[in-house]
Structure formats: C-alpha cells, structure tokens
Amino acid sequence: MNKTISVNINGLIFNIEEAAYERLKNYLDTIRKYLKNDVGSDEVITDIESRIGELFMEDINDRKEVINIEDVDRVISIMGQPEEYVDEGFEESSQQRSSRKGKKKRLFRDKDNSLIGGVCSGISNYFGWDPVWLRILAVVLFIFAGFGLLTYIILWVVIPKAETTAEKIQMYGEPVTVENIKKVVDDGIDSLVGNADSHSSQGARKEKVRSGLKSFFDAIISIFKALFKFVGKIFGAGLLFIGLIVLICLLFFLVDPAAIDFQRSSIGDAISFGDIKDLYIGDSSQGGLLTLGILMAVVAPLTALIYAGLKLIFKIRTNSKALGWVLVMVFIVGVSLAATSALRLTKEHTRHEIVQDISRVEVEAETIILESSEKKDNYRHHDGGSFLRFDNDVVKMERVEFTVLQSAYDTIPQVEVIRSCDGRNESEAKKRISGISYDWNVKGEKMIFDPFITINKKDLFRNQKVEVILRLPVGHKIFFDRSMRNIMYNIPNVKGIWDNDMVEETWLMSEDGLLCVSCEEEAI
C-alpha cells in the first residue's frame, strides 16, 4: 500500500504516489536550478509543467487514477534531462533521440505568421507547404467560387490557435522537450524549424517572391478591412436610426397615446391607440402592469440595438457586461409582467353566452329589398375585422354577421337576432349582452339593418357580436342592396356564389336553397 499525494500541475489535479512525487519534484527543481539565470525561465517552466500535465493525462483512465513512478520516468525520458541541454555535446544526442521518436504534427492556427486569422499559415505548416500559394487559392475561391470566405471562417472557428510554446513546437512536428522549449523561448520558433534554403541564392529568390506576394496580400487585406469598416459604420448607423425612431415613437405614445391614429372606420373617423387600449383593457391595475411589461420588454432590446449601433460607428471596443445583464433582466421582468397580466385578462373570456330574439316579419311585396342603414359605398367585404367609432361613452363596432336560411316551419319570414359576449361567469356575460344595442326595421318593401352594434365603453370589449339570420320561406324573393356587402357572411346558395357577387341581384328561396333569378348565365 503506497501513500498518495494530490498535486496541481498547471491547473490539472492529479493523485500521485509519494515516491513518484519526490522524483518529479527533484526533476523540476533541477530544471529551475539550471535555468535560474536565463531570461524567460518562468515561461519555460510553465510550458514544461503544461506539457507534463498533458503527458500525465494520457496515463489516466477509468482503471488507473494514480500516477506512479513508472509514469514519471516515462515523462522524464520524453522531456529529457536538464543537464543534457546545458552540455556542449547535447545537440547531437538530442537530435538522435528526436529522430528515433519521429515527428508527429498537430494542426493549429499560426498567429505569429498570419495575415488575418492564421488559418492558411497553420495548414501550410501542417502539410509543409508555402503559405503564399494557399493564400492565393483562398482568394481565388472567394472571388470566383463564392465559398472561400465561408470556408475560411469555418476553419477559423474549428482550428485552435497555437497559444503555448508547446503547441507551437507541436505545430511543426517537433518533440516537446525541455531543450526545444528553451530554444523557442530564447531564440524564437525559427531557431527550431530553421530554413536551410534561406541562405542559398535559390532561397533568397524564394524569399523575395514571398515578400512581394505578402505585400500584395497586405494591400488587398487593407482594402477589405477598410470596406468592412465602412459597411460596419453604415450598418451601425442603420441600427442606431431604427432604434432611435422606434424609441421616440414609443415615448411619444407614452406622453400622448391619443395622438397615434390606429385605423379609419367606415362608420367614423380616425381612432387612436389610446382609445383601443381603453376599450380592451380599461383603467384596471392589470392594464397598467401589462403596459409596463410591454414597455420594458420593448425598451431593453431597443437599448441594445442603439448601443450596438454606437459601437459600430465610434469603434467602441469595451463590452459592458453590466449593461448587458441589466438589459436581460429588464427584458425578462417585462415579459413576465406582460405574460402574467395577459393571462389574468384572459379570464375575462372564460364564459361565452348568447341571447336569441326571434321576430316574424310581414312585408307586402313580391320581392323584399335588403338594405343597410349606412348607404356609404366605402365598405369592405366582411373579413372578421372590427371597425370602431367612439362617441363619448358609447362605442359603435362593426360586429354584425348577416345570413339567410330557409324557414322550415313557417310561411312568414322571420328575423333571428343572436347577441353574444364573453365574461368571467354567466351572470357577467349576460349583463354585458344586455348592454348590446342593435336595430333593424321594416319600411314598406325594404328591410333595413344596422351594420354596427352599440355598447357602453365601460363594458369593455369582450367579444360582443350580433348574428342576424333571415329565415325565408320557400317561394319568397329577396334583393341584396350593395350596402349589405359589409355584413353579409357566408350566405349559402345553390350555385355557391360568393357574398360579394350576390349583391344587386334577385334571389328566390327554392326547395334546394337560394337561387339567383336575375343573374346572367355566365355569372352563374
């Protein structure tokens, strides 16, 4: 049974046997002793410890959780003894050991020799290519194929950057040893990989070509950077403009909501957003909380939009995490308030009630003319929308649906008026129904119907609606005036003609349903 110790090696925690710990400690202390007078010794030690941690991780698995002395000896054999690279004769022995172990490259982005992100230089290091030609290929693909930029961005994200000295050594396929780490820290990566042809005339020519191409690419990149900066400023200005315009409109609405026209009604003039809010929500506390929640949920992203625009325009590099968290919290609170208030307001629509009134109609005419009390010719065909008109405490709404059905039990036409409304309970819904006013009347050969209902503003909008059914006995004729278009709703007929096309025509109630007796054959 061996005693174990928990150690932290460059941020990695290992359980190591006591004897192995002593061996590793002596090894690192010896390295520190040899490097104590060297510039950059701390960086060398840090890289060595990082590499040792990586090698130890290779020994850990589900069946082996403790580092033993054999593992330490293996790591030391890979890293090399510190006294070796101090001796004059070390270089040859090190090269022999490296050649025996062979080269194993890893793919990294080479930021030290990069033009943009180090992707081309990193791939070139891995395959032993000249990065200039790979950069030319990337530009050609970007210009002519269109996918070069996307491929570059994907590789930029996927390929890690060579950060540490050990990673830079692995990028060139050299063994990560104490000797190589010290070389790179002291003299740079070029001291390790070398460049034999740079001292020959051929190497000088290659270097001249490489330098010229690099200058060419530097110029292209400068142009693209300037273009991206210009586009960024334009985009930032757009974000700023949109954010400010929406924010100003929102503030203007808060100051005077009645000034914002919402729609124009065919039975009245322009109405404001404030009128709509008062009709649907009223002055309840839930309405106030709903308004506050919507305001918070809208202002938070608008502020972020404006801030993003300012950053792009004025090159603000700092990221305010505090502002970001505040905006996120404001948005979450706003959405929560709005959702809670909206759910409570939906309880006002829990119960739906209807009240029916049936009246018999005697019209002394061969053909009954159906008209609307509003003769304006600016109606739209009914599409389920609600058009409003506010007159002090009274609200007129175009919430009327008119249809014609066959009367099966009577020889006299009947008008059935069905009023309906929502409420929290039955009594509340029926109370609101009693406040729905709707008029129709008979004048000679005409039956005249209002295209709107009237309610009290304090009753609020709770889906109040009126359905008017004209039950017509077989053999009776009717004529639809053009003014009826706005309230006609899915009137069944033998030929399946649409409501809009039924106006200005005479219809006979047959055994099979309404049949047009004045329509041209082509229209039918």
Image (cartoon, rainbow, N blue to C red):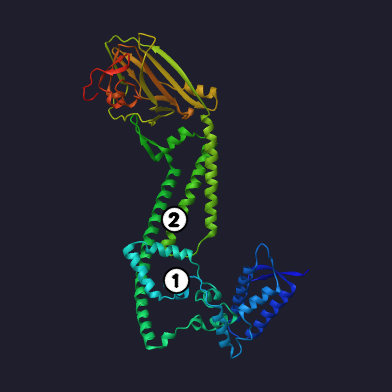
Q: Residue beneath label 2, please?
A: 306
Most extreme residue toward the front is 100
78 shown above or below 418: below
Q: Secondary structure at mark 2?
A: helix
Task: Name the residue nearer the viewer: 65 or 231.
Answer: 65
Task: Name the residue nearer the viewer: 343 or 198.
Answer: 198
Query: How many C-alpha atoms fall within 10 Å of the one at disc 1: few (<14), some, or many (≥20)?
Result: many
The quarter of the rendered structure image containing the N terminus is bottom right
Q: Residue at x 56, y 88 (%)?
A: 92
Residue 138, image x and y in percent? 37, 68
Residue 364, image x and y in percent? 29, 9
Total numbered circles: 2
Q: Residue beneath label 1, please?
A: 123
The answer to which of marks 2 and 1 sits earlier in the sequence is 1
Left or right: 481, with 182 as reference point: left
Circles 2 and 1: CB atoms closer than 8 Å? no
Q: Amino acid at mark 2?
A: Ile
